[in-house]
Amino acid sequence: GDSVTQMEGPVTLSEEAFLTINCTYTATGYPSLFWYVQYPGEGLQLLLKATKADDKGSNKGFEATYRKETTSFHLEKGSVQVSDSAVYFCALSDFTSYDKVIFGPGTSLSVIP
Amino acid sequence: DADVTQTPRNRITKTGKRIMLECSQTKGHDRMYWYRQDPGLGLRLIYYSFDVKDINKGEISDGYSVSRQAQAKFSLSLESAIPNQTALYFCATSAYNEQFFGPGTRLTVL
């Protein structure tokens, strides 16, 4: 079945460092790909998405490009802030599954001043 | 006001007790979901509903049941709680492939 794999955390970075969180997926169809973020004590919220190959999703300085050839959707940010400390989830959804979303295990990010 | 609300936010209960977690939404979405979150496992789908008359099991439905009382309300029940149901539970709605999550209910079963 479909699945999502993420790099293990926790990840600790200094403020203004470059961030990459790796995500790869397995899917039989042509899924949409997502990054969700969970701030402490809150539910998940959509950070960005891409619906087809070579699309780039971006939001709040974060970017991810849908790479069909490598089945990847890595999250990047050029300069992280303390306020980016959160858990990040890569996810996919296939139109054939009617909005059912498969989540990766999450990667915890801590940014220190 | 939050679009997706969950009650209670925290609950401690004992093994064997019946527990109901409630979810309400004001987004007008037909599709609603219940997930549980465990450290290192991400979110796993328990049940989902595409409208009031359509209820479906997710990957980990054993030990749980749900009720869709109205478009806006979707409740999750643990008929006889056990310690390995200790987790963070999230309700969500969806439209156009985007999911909208409630703040979560932290459930502890002793």
Image (tube, coloured by chain):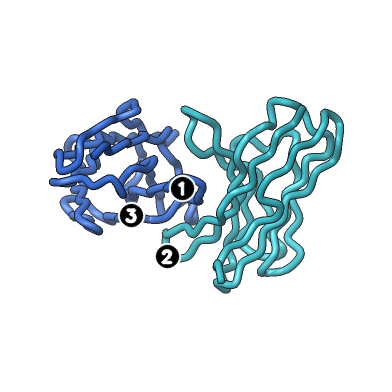
| Chain letter, disc 3 residue | A
Residue type for callout 3: Leu
In the rendered image, the quadrant that contains the C terminus of chain A is top left
In this view, A51 is above or below B46:
below
**Residue A100, x across and y down, in percent:** 49, 50
Hey, which quadrant is residue B67 in on the image?
bottom right
| Chain letter, disc 1 residue | A
Task: Determine whether, in the image, residue B88 is placed left or right of residue A34.
Answer: right
Indicate which label's residue lies in the foreground, 3 or 1.
3
**Residue A98, x across and y down, in percent:** 49, 56
What hue does chain A carry in this figure? Answer: blue
Residue placed under numbered mark 3 in the picture: A47
| Chain letter, disc 2 residue | B
Hey, which quadrant is residue B65 in on the image?
top right
Label 2, secondary structure: give it.
loop
In this view, B87 is above or below B7:
above
Which residue corresponds to the image point at 72% horizontal and 49% vertical from the top-left?
Answer: B76
Residue placed under numbered mark 1 in the picture: A101
Residue count near mark 1 (Cα–Cα under 10 Å), binned few <14, some 14–19, many ≥20: many
Q: Which chain is cyan?
A: B
Residue placed under numbered mark 2 in the picture: B96
Which residue corresponds to the image point at 46% horizontal and 47% vertical from the top-left?
Answer: A101
**Residue A76, x across and y down, in percent:** 19, 44
* Of the image marks 3 and 1, the number of the one nearer the N terminus: 3
Residue B63 shows which numbered tag?
A: none
Residues at circles 1 and 2 in contact by the CB criterion of under 8 Å: no
